[in-house]
Amino acid sequence: MSLKHGILGLLNYGSMTGYELMKVFEDSLVFFWKAQTSQIYRDLDTIEKKGWVTSEMVIQQDKPNKKIFTVTEEGKSEFLRWLNEHSPHKTMQYRDELTMRMYFSAAGDKEKLVEELELYASLNKEFYCRLEGIEKTIAHYADKVENPQEPLYWRMAIMRGLFNAEGNIKWVNACLKLLEDERVL
Amino acid sequence: MSLKHGILGLLNYGSMTGYELMKVFEDSLVFFWKAQTSQIYRDLDTIEKKGWVTSEMVIQQDKPNKKIFTVTEEGKSEFLRWLNEHSPHKTMQYRDELTMRMYFSAAGDKEKLVEELELYASLNKEFYCRLEGIEKTIAHYADKVENPQEPLYWRMAIMRGLFNAEGNIKWVNACLKLLEDERVL
DNA sequence: TGGGTCATGTAACCTGTTACATGATTAG
DNA sequence: CTAATCATGTAACAGGTTACATGACCCA
């Protein structure tokens, strides 16, 4: 459940081609949802068959032809159904490969683990800064959407990324300290 | 990439049946990896075909027969390969449905969102307490494993869950405050 | 007599990943 | 000249989910 609903959500802002969706995902949603181009096209196909979107072919001269997708009423109500269905239990049962690797790491190479943790922390710092940058650009988009409350929700989504990154960095520091202490003994 | 490696990791502690693996997942790894029984059996099958494990059928009278799985040398080296391969980039490109829902929630029902956030926070508190409980039982298992460093790594895995839950709760509080402020205006 | 534990799975499905393929225009 | 941008996808695979199926023993 979800790339499809992300697509529906974006098409609510306006009709788009698969290519444009791909870019919006890359520019704005990549922070919490990484979408493959191949999957976008496949899912567009699927949701068109389900009747959630319709498409219109536009023939162009200079550029390749394109296919513009528009949400239908069914699509809108499916989107709202998804949006209002709350399922935090599902969110809780997450999978995290890094935690699993940590769990088993007594058997592994400690040098590599330390390197990995350090890299992970620096990626999180980078991520944190990028998100802060994006937060600042929100105001810029604010007057382009109908609903004036939109930016508030975007900000809360971004905040989740910030809290998360912060937690990851703290965790790495705590781990590095423990690993260091243990090396001294 | 991963339930298979989790299974290999557990079989390193000792040979087990699919049923026992299922219980260990449920008791100890469920905090960072939720495994379906059906998938455990299917993956055991797959990794047996790959030569990472072998199985031995044990006929029992009072109870149903069982199939005990043991890691092979290939399995052990595949496990180590996975353990030492570090890929924090992959860990970064995560997907989070709750963030996506938040992002689009200007279009949704605010009451339901608040309810969901409150439930999410309480689930995280519960989770936090459960993890603390588990952390305390680590000492108990400590002398059952060969490598005395094992518990340190378990503790770090658990810590990740704790930091995470803490971050989630803080995020919910920040969001509830923002939503409250906005309602007052 | 009903529910829990022991113990095994199959089948269909959904979602995401990887690798590949095409081909024109435009800006540096 | 070459790299980026525009614009479309297909095929095969890997990993996880849902729903179902079987059957005996033991304890309250």
Image (cartoon, coloured by chain):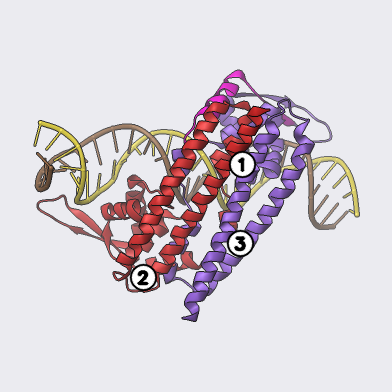
Chain colours: A red, B purple, C brown, D yellow
Alpha carbon separation for disc pair 3 and 2:
34 Å
Residue C28 lies, with reference to residue A57, above or below; the image says above
* Residue bounds of the magenta highlight: B66-87
Instruction: Identify residue for label 2.
Output: A73
Tell me the mark number nearer the camera, choosing from 3 and 2: 3
Q: Residue at x 38, y 49 (%)?
A: A35
Foreground residue among A27 and B112: A27
Residue A103 lies, with reference to residue A153, above or below; the image says above
Residue A9: give x, y in percent of width and height: 38, 63
Left or right, A122 with reference to B11 = left
Name the image quarter holding residue A69. Answer: bottom left
Q: Tell me the kind of residue under disc 2.
A: Glu
Label 3 element class: helix
Foreground residue among A177 and B5: A177
Q: Residue furthest top?
A: B73
Instruction: Identify residue for label 3.
Output: B121
Q: Residue at x 73, y 31 (%)?
A: B66
Residue B97: give x, y in percent of width and height: 48, 56
Whether residue A51 is visible to the viewer of this picture, yes or no, is no
Q: Chain ID for label 1?
A: B
